[in-house]
Amino acid sequence: MMISLEDVAQLTAGRLLASGGQLLEQLTGVEIDSRRILPGQLFVAYRGEHLDGHDYAGAAVAAGAAALLVEHPVEGLPHPVPQVVVPQPRAALIRLANRALLRSQIDTVIGITGSAGKTTTRHIISTILSAAYPGQVLEPPASYNTDTGLSMTILNHLQPEHRFAVFEMAAQRIGEIASLCELAPPTIGLVTNVGPAHLEFFGSLANVAQAKGELIEALSASGLAVLNAEDAAVRAMVHRSPAPAAFYGFGEAADYRGRIVREDDLGMEIAWTTPTASGDAYVHLLGEHNLLNVLGALAVAERCDVPAAVARRALGSLRPVASRLQVLAGPRGTTIIDDCYNANRLSAIAGLQVLATRAKPGHRIAVLGDMFELGQYGPEEHHAVGMAAAASVDYLFTIGTLAAHIAQGAIQAGMSSARVCHISAPADQAFRRQSQPQDQVALSRQTLAEALLGRLSSGDVVLFKAGRGMRLDYVIDLLRQNL
């Protein structure tokens, strides 16, 4: 989406300082990271807890930034550029995105939240809607689910032909999803589940449920709440909105219900029933939790008037999002299930349940690492994952600090210690996906890869699951070099 400097100044109530810079009629987009700036973009100078974006304004201008959105005028730039001065650049960016969205042609905003499954559900919904309405669906290019991410999605990717927007909405504290709903008022709200994610900040599961339900509270009476009937905390959200509700799940009480007909190594054949139709499809997704994600997406699709035949064809074209139960070829005739994008107890146990149905006649091997942002609940959450692993796997490899509790939980649940290997290792605090880890991190992951190679044999299936900073993606890359 092209925005003008006049738009930026007017919509943010900012003070435009030309300072001898060229006043471009149109900017090409916005960016907050000086390392990713593209020519013609507006650089937004955030003041964070550890870094101040104003210190990097010069680097952004040198890289091609055409203008700055700043808290105070920045001097010493490589060359003059216009600056829009506002009290709070972050709040100004959000306001700019909100105004751009409200004056666009989008008439249906679909908000998705939950402790797990947001990205996959967003991907399924977008795939179905895009099949029915080609070129008319706005979605983030990645898991951009914060106020900054949604703002940059709107300002960088919104086009005049877009009619639908599909947004993930994440939170670490009560009130954050409500703020996201002010930025992008939802027409349809879908909640996948309530689980022990970000407990370090939320403090309790009750607070997680309170926060996720803010999406449902933001719906008007003409909207639709799409709720997972298999999760009691999500079902209870029906009372928090004047909007009608559509429930999805496995039982007769669900409006959108389905079952797995058969599974293989790459996906599953599913069948479903909705209030108006029934259908079946083969989808390249694994696990009952992904069947739930499909059912929720079908509820959204029906509300958006997608023909049943179109939805069925779209489901057949689905492929998993990278590092979300993504099946890859491993070394020595093994199979890797890459689920290492992120982790909490809910998603880790879901991954283990998928692994439990695999690897015949080979072994089922789980590689599990630290899960983050759990605070005082960290040891017990990891211990619970270990207990689940004992019932699901033949061999268990754990890596990290908190992951020692996974190993202990598995052994306490009856798994032989001879089948458990724990490697103490630091997290990658400077994590950037597809980058080389820090030296100490890389060395420990190489140790893990070597230990795995000593265990692997043809037919084995290996699940990788951990927080992103544990860099299990790097371990997978090392193993796949041995294909």
Image (cartoon, rainbow, N blue to C red):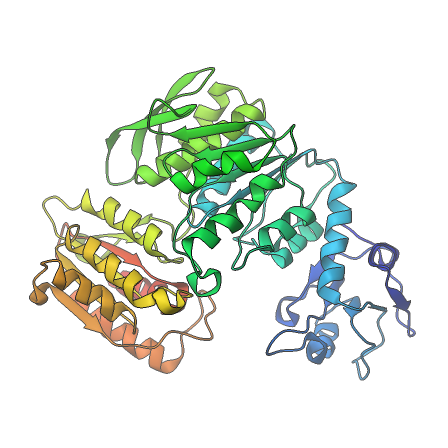
483 to the left or right of 174: left
The percent position of residue 407, horizontal first and vertical second, equals 19, 66
The percent position of residue 240, horizontal first and vertical second, equals 55, 38
201 to the left or right of 184: left
Task: Give the residue at x 16% y 69%.
Answer: 421
Kindly tell me whether residue 245 is visible in this rendering: yes
Task: Give the residue at x 55% y 56%.
Answer: 174
* Residue 409 location, quadrant: bottom left
Is 240 drawn above or below residue 351 in the view shown?
A: above
287 to the left or right of 71: left
Is 340 drawn above or below residue 98 in the view shown?
A: below
Task: Give the residue at x 15% y 51%.
Answer: 391
Report the quarter where the C terminus lies: bottom left
Q: Residue furthest bottom?
A: 76
Task: Give the residue at x 76% y 60%.
Answer: 92
The percent position of residue 332, horizontal first and vertical second, equals 17, 57
57 to the left or right of 375: right
